[in-house]
Image (spheres, rainbow, N blue to C red):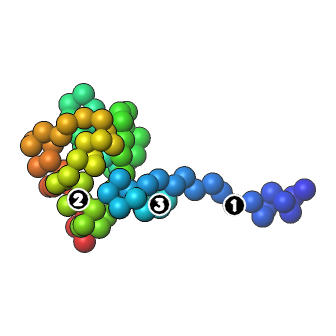
Amino acid sequence: MKEQLAQRRKHVPTRTCVACRSKAGKRALVRLVRTENGVFVDPSGKMNGRGAYLCEQESCWQRALTTDVLDKALRVTLTAEDRERLKMAKPLP
């Protein structure tokens, strides 16, 4: 019985990048969250609101900010202010 418990691996939650559709561990992706005040980067991953995940790749951020994939994932129309805030907050390569 103890051997079986020792062999079990801890569950790692996986999420999908809304831009490239690749799957990765929750901690490997950047969470964006829609709140009543707009769309923000969620560094803790625990903010209330509808969330979407992006890779740290430049191409994913470009696609998310120039097309409507992020709008659809968050079920909101991004404002110019939201897009600028996210451009400034994106991780550096």
For the point 23% across and 59% down, which residue is it? Answer: 63
Q: Nearer the viewer, mark 1 or mark 2?
A: 2
- The amino acid marked with disc number 1 is Arg
The residue tagged with tag 2: helix, strand or loop?
helix
Which of disc 3 and disc 1 is earlier in sequence? 1
Residue at the (20%, 31%) spot, across then down: 37
Which residue is disc 2 drawn over?
63
Per the rendering, the mark at residue 59 is none
Q: Position of residue 88 (x, y in %)?
A: 14, 55
Q: Earlier in the sequence, mark 2 or mark 3?
A: 3
- Identify which residue, 14 or 59, lies in the foreground: 59
Q: Which mark is residue 9?
A: 1
What percent of the width, then of the height, locates residue 36? 24, 28
Could you tell which of marks 1 and 2 lies nearer the N-terminus? 1
Type of amino acid under label 3: Lys
Q: From the top left corner, tell me how far across and down residue 28 is, in percent.
A: 42, 61
Alpha-carbon span between mark 1 and mark 2: 35 Å
Residue placed furthest toward the right: 1
**Residue 23 has which mark?**
3
Name the residue located 78 percent from the left edge and 64 percent from the top edge.
7
| Labels 1 and 3 touching (C-beta < 8 A) | no
Q: Residue, x 36% and y 36% (percent of image)?
A: 50
Q: Residues within 10 Å of mark 2 (few under 14, many from 20)?
A: some
Element on which disc 3 rests: strand
Quarter of the image holding residue 16?
bottom left
The local secondary structure at tag 1 comes to loop
Real-space CA distance between mark 2 and mark 3, rounded to the nearest whole angstrom: 17 Å
Q: CA distance from mark 1 to mark 3?
A: 19 Å
x and y percentages locating residue 21 in the rendered image = 40, 59
Q: Quadrant of the C terminus?
A: bottom left
Point out the residue furthest to the top here. Answer: 36
